[in-house]
Image: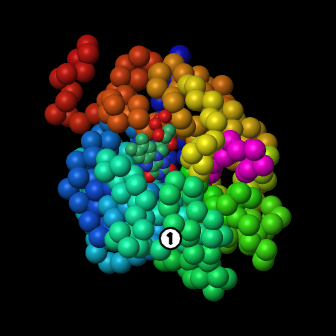
Amino acid sequence: MKSSLFSPFSMRGLTIDNRIMLSPLCQYSSVDGCMNDWQMTHLGMYAMSGASFVCFEMTDVEPAGRITYGCSGLWNDEQEAALARVLAHCRKYGQAKYALQIAHAGRRASKKAPFEGSKPMSVAQGGWQAVAPSAIPEGDGSDAPHALTIPEIKSLVEKFAAATKRAARVGFDAIELHGAHGYLLHQFLSPLSNQRTDEYGGSLANRMRFPLEVFAAMRAVWPADKPLGVRISCTEWMPGGWDIDEAVVLSHELKKLGCDWIDASSGAGFKQAKIPYAPGYQVPFAERIKKEVGIATIAVGLITEFDHAEKIVASGQADIIALGRGLMWNPRWGWHAAKALGETLDIPPQYLRVRPGA
Ligand SMILES: Cc1cc2nc3c(=O)[nH]c(=O)nc-3n(C[C@H](O)[C@H](O)[C@H](O)COP(=O)(O)O)c2cc1C
């Protein structure tokens, strides 16, 4: 019987050979926002990993939108050229299709990298002023962010569109807009981090306004034959916080604007959130959005077993499986999944002799 995980999937003019995606993974290793030889090595490895959809890490639309000084950016020509170099390398040796995740960290900006302790950096410590819908700090010792004015919000929408135009020039196959994990778009959606009293805060329609304006501006400049999806946190796991019912409404609105997929993540905005971590704990969000909204979904989070991934796609809970840590730990996960599920993958010819049974 044919494996569902290894069946092709199409969105607009893009067809991916199987349903395995490398989840976007910040590397905190860029210099002045420019990717370099580290991403050549890191992403080059996943380009030939059997994952047919490789998402480049969170890449920010302005300097203040970076989590750390090592985050990738796309607001100038040098960054555009650096991305083009990594993408050309992946295309030369890999078998995958490539998405770029476009983002802004909002109030979660100005920190040390995780491998340097993740500590917030104040302006006096060499960091920078973070921005957010409201001047409410993250609660991890970060300084209060600057509450964006309406002209600043409009200018940020333009910055997302400008980065999208650059991504189109670089030649990515798809874009994923990052609306999850407590970063800027999520901060606007959340009634906990967004306490504005103007048209960008309060009601659900107002809280969705900025993310929807960003999406529409990006869709308008991204090629019509290329898909544009959104990663959202389907709940922030906080009493009184953003939840799956609101996420379903947002997904309907995004679909109306031409969104091609919802990457159904959750949480990450609040350290005190109680999250029921378990294999596939976010899959029910992907399933509900897929069924109620009629949009393609990506399931992500603690999916590590081949049979589990196969079952999620075969049972129609989600269309694509994104793996983060599972693929980082075992970059040949896709090869091993294909073997376990009785499929034969295209792999680089230099490696053909090592395939079991070859
Ligand atoms: C090192 C690391 C970096 C990450 N960077 C990003 C990122 O750039 N964008 C994003 O949306 N999620 C990011 N995540 C979250 C992953 O994409 C993924 O959603 C999460 O790890 C859960 O999937 P997993 O259980 O398969 O790892 C990161 C996770 C890790 C471990």
Give the percent coordinates (x, y) of residue 8: 51, 37
Q: Nearer the viewer, residue 17 or 251?
A: 251
Give the percent coordinates (x, y) of residue 316: 66, 30
* Residue picked out by circle 1: 130
Give the residue at the far right of this rendering.
203
Q: Can residue 346 be seen in this view?
A: no
Q: Please check the rendered image and state whether residue 241 is part of the magenta-colored stretch, yes or no.
A: yes
Q: Classify residue 341 as left or right of residue 316.
A: left
Q: Please check the rendered image and state whether residue 138 is part of the magenta-colored stretch, yes or no.
A: no
- In magenta, the rendered stretch is 229-244
Secondary structure under tag 1 reads: loop
Q: Inspect the image, locate mark 1, and give the three-letter code of the amino acid beneath it.
A: Ala
Q: Classify residue 112 as left or right of residue 163.
A: left
Q: Classify residue 329 as left or right of residue 109.
A: left
Give the percent coordinates (x, y) of residue 211: 66, 65
Looking at the image, residue 232 lies above or below residue 175: above
Which residue does the image show at 64% across and 36% down from the upper left?
Answer: 274
Q: Nearer the viewer, residue 1 or 168?
A: 168
Give the residue at the far top of this rendering.
357
Which residue does the image show at 55% across and 37% down from the upper left?
Answer: 300
